[in-house]
Image: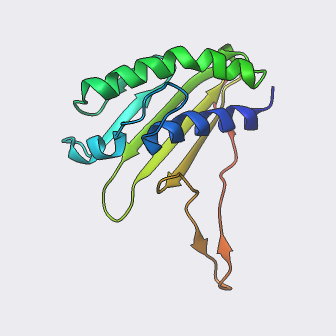
């Protein structure tokens, strides 16, 4: 199992929720970014492995969707030929403050490798920056081994 495959699955799940149109769980009227903007903390944390939400009150529809994501994750992993047990952590933080919507995904595998990736907009794209020579760069942080 490659760690990049776990990151890819995590992006598919988190972006499906952020888009508001999730074929994965059969719900098409979701607004996690809007609910994050209206929450007192201005963010919503979603733990896809546990099927839980924190960071503020959410609608019954969004709560139901998160529980469906939890139930759909094993099938998605099976399609990617990955065991769900390969994930130790699969979380996303959604926020919609300022000029654009963002979500940050944290993935940890069974060996302790961890990666945190940020995405901007809808659909989620990596944030871009311009280097000192005027070239557009899309940084991708490498995975880190936290513990064994």
Q: Determine which quarter of the picture holds residue 35.
A: top left
Q: Nearer the viewer, residue 62 or 141?
A: 62
Q: Quadrant of the N terminus?
A: top right
Q: Nearer the viewer, residue 6 or 73?
A: 73
Query: Where residue 27 sits in the image (x, y, percent)?
Result: 43, 29
Judge whether 135 appears above or below 11 on screen. below
- The residue located at (47%, 53%) in the rendering is 122
- The residue located at (58%, 67%) in the rendering is 128
Q: Determine which quarter of the picture holds residue 75.
A: top right
Residue 110 visible? The answer is no
Query: Where residue 131 sits in the image (x, y, percent)?
Result: 64, 78
Left of 49 or right of it: where is 33? left
Please tell me how many numbered marks the rendered image carries.
Answer: 0
Q: Residue furthest left?
A: 40
- The residue located at (58%, 20%) in the rendering is 73
Judge whether 1 appears above or below 20 on screen. above
Left of 76 or right of it: where is 95? left
Judge whether 52 appears above or below 129 on screen. above
Query: Where residue 143 sits in the image (x, y, percent)?
Result: 69, 41
Residue 65 visible? The answer is yes
- The residue located at (68%, 85%) in the rendering is 133
Left of 42 or right of it: where is 120? right
Q: Quadrant of the C terminus?
A: top right
Query: Where residue 98 sits in the image (x, y, percent)?
Result: 31, 62
| Chosen colour scheme | rainbow
Q: Residue furthest bottom?
A: 133
């Amino acid at each position: 199992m490659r760690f990049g495959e776990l990151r890819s699955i995590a992006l598919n799940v988190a972006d499906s929720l952020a888009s508001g149109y999730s074929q994965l769980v059969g719900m098409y009227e979701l607004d996690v970014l809007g609910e994050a903007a209206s929450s007192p903390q201005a963010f919503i944390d979603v733990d896809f492995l546990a099927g839980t939400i924190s960071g503020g009150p959410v609608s019954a529809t969004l709560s139901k969707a998160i529980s469906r994501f939890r139930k759909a994750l094993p099938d998605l992993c099976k399609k990617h030929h990955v065991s769900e047990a390969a994930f130790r952590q699969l979380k996303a933080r959604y926020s919609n403050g300022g000029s654009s919507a963002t979500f940050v995904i944290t993935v940890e595998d069974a060996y302790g490798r961890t990666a945190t990736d940020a995405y901007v907009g809808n659909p989620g794209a990596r944030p871009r920056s311009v280097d000192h020579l005027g070239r557009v760069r899309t940084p991708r942080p490498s995975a880190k081994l936290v513990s064994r």
